[in-house]
Amino acid sequence: MSSVSSTYPLPVDDDEVKRSELHHRMMQFVFSGKNYVGPVKEALQFGQKRRILDLGTGSGQWAIDMADEFPRAEVIGIDIAPIQPKYVPPNCT
């Protein structure tokens, strides 16, 4: 990815994507391979509308992992920096 002009004050390039993905993997390691703490699975099983929102999604890796884990949920990742991949699961935007 090339550097893109935006209101985001930090770099928007391949190094930032790698940093964001490394941060995601480190958090998974800290939480024993899990993407969340708490009754998320239970809440998504019984909720009428299954939606997951990731504010400040960065590379989008957490949103993608959640979309893979919960294919019936609508997962939305939002970030000011345009560094998300083009190809994501069908339930992830």
Image: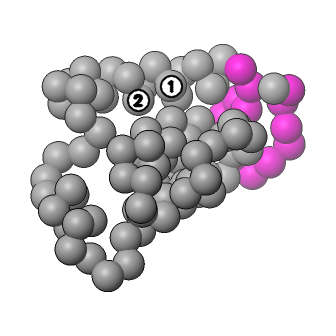
Residue 12 sits inside the magenta stretch = yes
Q: Which residues are magenta?
A: 2-14
* Residue that lies at the very extreme toward the bottom in this rendered image: 48
User: Residue 82 appears in which quarter of the rendering?
Assistant: top right
Quick check: marks 1 and 2 in contact, CB under 8 Å?
yes
Q: Nearer the viewer, residue 6 or 60?
A: 60
Q: Return the residue at label 1.
A: 21
Q: Is residue 28 above or below residue 61?
A: above
Q: Is residue 21 above or below residue 85?
A: above
Question: Main SS of the magenta segment?
Answer: loop
Amino acid marked by disc 2? His
Q: Return the residue at label 2.
A: 24
Q: In the structure shown, which secondary structural element does the residue marked by tag 2 occupy? A: helix
Residue 81 sits inside the magenta stretch = no
Alpha-carbon distance for marks 1 and 2? Answer: 5 Å
Amino acid marked by disc 1? Glu
Percent x, y for residue 56?
A: 52, 50
Percent x, y for residue 25?
A: 38, 23
**Residue 15 relative to residue 47: left or right:** right
Tell me if I can see residue 62 in this picture.
no
Percent x, y for residue 39?
A: 13, 58
**Residue 33 relative to residue 17: left or right:** left
Which image quadrant: the C terminus? bottom right
